[in-house]
């Protein structure tokens, strides 16, 4: 996979964490029984005083970015320096985004699979992993692909990516999606009853991205009208 060549302009390291979204915290992530241990493992990384490496992987709606950002926020709250690097968005800046990464205790690299296949990026990742191990840093990755199946051109990179733990985040089943939707709504002070959720399920896709977009629209409509979220309000907001 190719990517845009690095520009001549130096990358501003403080810009890295502008990609963090305010609501992406551990306490806003709904963890199913299958994913709860993964969340616990990420949270425990905050107290690591030696090198630790983890890669989490799964499909689009499993919450990989949410968890990496939540880990960064939790690190800040513990006084731990951390950098969040979503490669799918930042790769246009080139591998200069890794300059100065040795100054962080924790580095969270989202969408690592988005640069696999590019010689320059693969070498930069290889060097970063080696450096983090020598510097006793905590290094976390996310991938949409099973990391064992990544088609790395640099043969030794794949083994480096698998140095630490590899966790698959599982997709939520329908019951868990219902619980997660109510959970996220409750964090906004919204009560969703089963009749409203059933109405939404019958008319809209059940992927979690769509459900969260719907929740955003219902939240705005409820605030604007000062009404509870009922089926008539859903019809009005989503027409």
Image (cartoon, grey):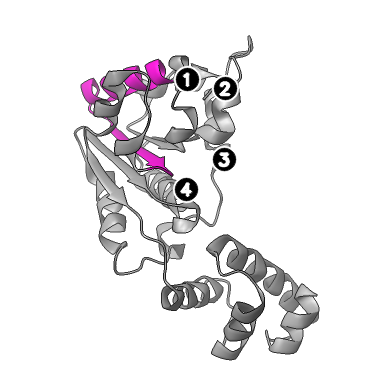
| Labels 2 and 4 touching (C-beta < 8 A) | no
User: Which of the two marks, 3 or 4, is nearer to us in this view?
Assistant: 4
The Cα–Cα distance between marks 2 and 4, rounded to whole angstroms, is: 21 Å
Query: Could you say which is closer to the camera, residue 191 or residue 3?
Result: 3
Q: Which mark is residue 65?
A: 4
Q: Earlier in the sequence, mark 3 or mark 4?
A: 3
Name the spot of residue 178 as percent of width and height, x first. Answer: 49, 77
**Which residue carries the number 1 mark?**
118
| Labels 3 and 1 touching (C-beta < 8 A) | no
* 161 in relation to 146, above or below: above
Residue shown at 68%/72% (left/top)?
219
Task: Locate the C terminus by quadrant.
Answer: bottom right
Label 1 SS? loop
Name the spot of residue 107 as percent of width and height, x first. Answer: 38, 33
| Labels 1 and 2 touching (C-beta < 8 A) | yes
User: Which of the two marks, 3 or 1, is nearer to us in this view?
Assistant: 1
**Which residue carries the number 2 mark?**
3
**Which residue carries the number 3 mark?**
19
Label 2 SS? loop
Residue shown at 34%/46% (left/top)?
56
Q: Residues within 10 Å of mark 2 (few under 14, many from 20)?
A: some
Magenta residues, as a range?
Answer: 122-145
> Is residue 226 something that shows in the picture?
no
- Quarter of the image for residue 128 reads top left
* 1 in relation to 192, above or below: above
Residue shown at 72%/81% (left/top)?
234
């Amino acid at each position: 996979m190719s990517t845009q060549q690095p520009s001549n302009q130096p990358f501003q390291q403080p810009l890295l964490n502008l990609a963090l979204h305010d609501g992406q915290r551990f306490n806003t992530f709904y963890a199913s029984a299958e994913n709860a241990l993964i969340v616990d493992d990420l949270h425990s990384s905050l107290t690591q005083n030696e090198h630790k490496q983890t890669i989490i992987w799964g499909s689009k709606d499993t919450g990989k970015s949410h968890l990496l950002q939540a880990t960064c926020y939790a690190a800040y709250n513990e006084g731990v320096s951390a950098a969040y690097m979503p490669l799918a968005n930042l790769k246009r800046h080139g591998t200069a985004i890794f300059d100065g990464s040795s100054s962080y205790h924790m580095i969270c690299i989202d969408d690592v699979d988005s640069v696999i296949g590019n010689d320059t990026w693969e070498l930069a990742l290889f060097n970063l992993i080696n450096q983090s191990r020598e510097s006793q840093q905590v290094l976390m990755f996310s991938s949409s692909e099973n990391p064992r199946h990544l088609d790395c051109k640099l043969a030794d990179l794949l083994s480096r990516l698998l140095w630490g733990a590899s966790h698959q985040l599982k997709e939520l089943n329908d019951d868990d999606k219902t619980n997660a939707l109510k959970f996220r709504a409750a964090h906004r002070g919204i009560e969703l009853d089963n009749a409203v959720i059933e109405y939404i399920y019958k008319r809209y896709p059940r992927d979690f991205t769509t459900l969260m977009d719907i929740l955003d629209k219902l939240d705005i409509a409820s605030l604007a009208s000062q009404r509870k979220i009922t089926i008539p309000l859903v019809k009005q907001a989503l027409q």
